[in-house]
Image (spheres, rainbow, N blue to C red):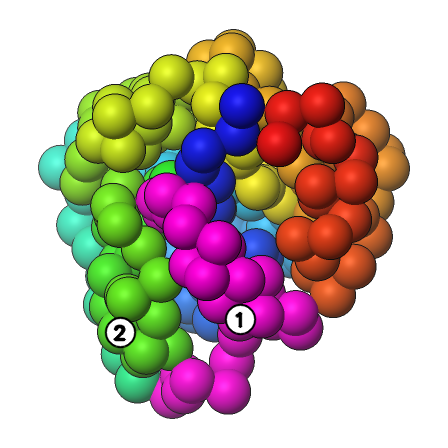
Amino acid sequence: MIKGFIFDLDGVITDTAELHYTAWKNLADKMDWEFDRTINDKLRGISRMDSIKVILDHNNAKLNKETLVELAKEKNDIYVESLNTMTPDDYLPGIKELLTNLRIEGFNVALGSASKNALKVLEQLNATAFFDIIGDGNSVSKSKPEPDIFLYGAEKLKLQPEECIVVEDAESGIDAAKAGGFHSIGIGPEERLGHADLRFDSTKEATLFEIKSYFKDLF
């Protein structure tokens, strides 16, 4: 039986993708690196340090670890500053209603995000009360597609993976959910998330009614 839900943050609860893109673009321009939206798409769902390595690889650039850490911090500072512009109006369509209904029906809910700024984002949205557990980039050492962040959430909720549904917008996130033995819902296009157990084109379609209808044998 399904007893818990674990949500990714970016692209599921809210869309900070444009803020991330702008921050990475600012850094890339400063370093004279090529960076566009195609490269940016490859950063979906992965950690900050893994992201900068993707950008480096694309540009055939090499830097020592100390410099990489400094640049990643610089990007993060730009991004964190931009978070101050977020408000409780910045939930993606239908997500606040879904979280509210999960609360009403007594499900356990965790966040499972690679972001180390997840708490700040939730606070800007006034969303912390929807979550029993907040798992973020500070909670585990291995990021998606490893399942560690979801396993962390399930353990803290005192649930088994098969008792939880993971909601993700990234291919690496669905890979992580499957690797951990979780049920999965993908938010986004077929070509990216066709391997999820259930997929919606947008968050607006992901109602609790539709989720229960699909996983009816598990509720």
Q: Is residue 50 above or below residue 151?
A: below
Q: What residue lies at 17% left-to-right and 50% top-to-bottom?
A: 70
The x, y position of residue 206, in whole percent, is 72, 54
Q: Viewer-proximal residue, 77 or 120?
A: 120
Q: Viewer-proximal residue, 199 or 158?
A: 158
Q: What residue lies at 58% left-to-right and 16% top-to-bottom?
A: 178
Q: Amino acid at mark 1?
A: Lys
- Residue 96 is labelled as 1
Q: Amino acid at mark 2?
A: Glu
Q: Viewer-proximal residue, 58 or 211?
A: 211
Q: What residue lies at 54% left-to-right and 23% top-to-bottom?
A: 1
* Magenta residues, start to end: 85-111
Q: Is residue 153 visible?
A: yes
**Side (left or right) of 69 relative to 92:** left
Mark 1 to mark 2 CA distance (whole Å): 14 Å
The x, y position of residue 48, in whole percent, is 34, 44
Magenta stretch holds residue 95: yes
